[in-house]
Amino acid sequence: MFKANNLAENRAGSHGNLRRLTYFVAVVETGSFTAAAERLGITKAVVSQQVARLESEFRTSLLVRTTRRVQPTETGRAFYLRCAMILREAEEAFDELAEGSTEPSGVLRLTAPFDYGVGIVVPVIAAFMQRYPACKVDAILSDQTLNIMDGNIELAIRVGWLAETGLQARKIGSFRQVLVAAPAMAPQLAPLTGPEDIARLPFVANTALRDHLHWDFSLGETERRDVTVQASVRLDATLAVREAVRHGMGLSVLPDFAVEEDLAAGRLIEVLPQWRLPSGGIHAVFPSARFRPVKVRAFVDLLADSEQRRRALNGSQA
C-alpha cells in the first residue's frame, strides 16, 4: 500500500501520469513500443521510458516484454481496461465540448455483422463520408461478436437479440426472419400445408446461428409450431446460405434484409408466408460513457433513417 506522501506526489504529477496512460494504452493495443510510437508520432525511446517510469512509480509490472511482442500482465490488463475507458471518455468529452462549433470529424471505428454490413452499413458509410468529408471510417465486418471494449471500437451494430451487459444501446430497427426457397423448388413446395411439412425437404443450415435446426413458427396470436429440420447442407455465413438457396440446394431461414431484393426480383420465393418466425432487433451498441462523440451520433442517425426508409419501402411487419 502506498504511503500518504507517495499518493500526494502521484496526484501532483497527475498531468504526467495521464500522458503516460496514453503511451501505455497505445503499447497494449499495438503490441509493441515501436508501433505505439508510430501511432503517437513520437520516438520509441520516449514511449519505453515513460511506461517504465509508470511501472516504477507504482512498483508493479504492467507489461511482459518478449522478442516478438509486448503483452500486459494480469495487473496490466486490468489497468489497461480502466485506462482505455478514461481516455475514451476524455476524447468524447472534448468532442462534446466542440460539438456546437464543429461538424463530425476524425476516424469512426465500428463493427457490424458481415451480411448486414455489406447490404446496409456500407451504403450508409458512403452517405456519411459524403455528408461529413472530415470523417474517415474504419469498419470491421465480421460474423463474430467483437468485444468493443478490447478493440477500441466506438460503435457496434448488433443484429438479433442482445446478450451483452454493461453497454449502452439504441434500437434503430428490426428485421423479420423469412423462410425462402428457389422458384425451382415450387413443385416440392406445393403440397406443404404447415411448417411441420418442411422437415422432409432439404434444408440449408446457417451454423453461424446458435440454434440453426429448430424454428418456432406462429400463426396469429395462438397457434404455434416448433419444427426441427434436418440439414442437407451446412454453411457458416448468411450470404453463403443465401447463395446455396438461390441455386436450389434447399429451403432456409434468412433475415429479410438479406433477401428483399431477391424476393422482389423473383430469384427467391417466400414459403408459407402466412406463418411467422420471431422478429429480431437491430441495435447500435456503444461503450458505457457519459458522452458520445458527435461523429458516432451522426452515423447512428443516418443508419436509423436508412432503416426507417427500408422498413417503409418493404412494408415489413417486423
Image (cartoon, rainbow, N blue to C red):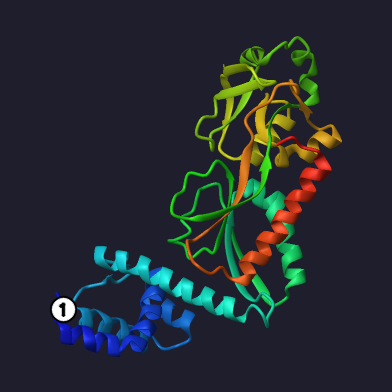
Q: Quadrant of residue 8?
A: bottom left
Residue 94 in sight from this viewpoint: yes
Name the residue at 71% across, 49% down: 119
Percent x, y for residue 68? 33, 69
Q: Amino acid at mark 1?
A: Phe
Quadrant location of the N terminus in the rendered image: bottom left
Residue 302 in the image: above or below residue 307? below
**313 relative to 302 in the view: left or right:** right
SS at badge 1 = loop
Q: Which residue is label 1 attached to?
A: 2
Percent x, y for residue 262? 79, 37
Mark 1 Cα-neighbour bin, 10 Å: few <14, some 14–19, many ≥20? few
Name the residue at 37% across, 65% down: 81
**144 relative to 272 in the view: left or right:** left
Residue 257 in the image: above or below residue 307? above
**41 relative to 57 in the view: left or right:** right
Percent x, y for residue 156? 56, 56
Nearest the eye: 49 or 13? 13
Name the residue at 33% across, 84% down: 17
Name the residue at 52% across, 44% down: 162
Residue 137 in sight from this viewpoint: no
Percent x, y for residue 309? 79, 50
Residue that protrudes farthest toward the right in the picture: 265
Residue 298 in the image: above or below residue 312? below
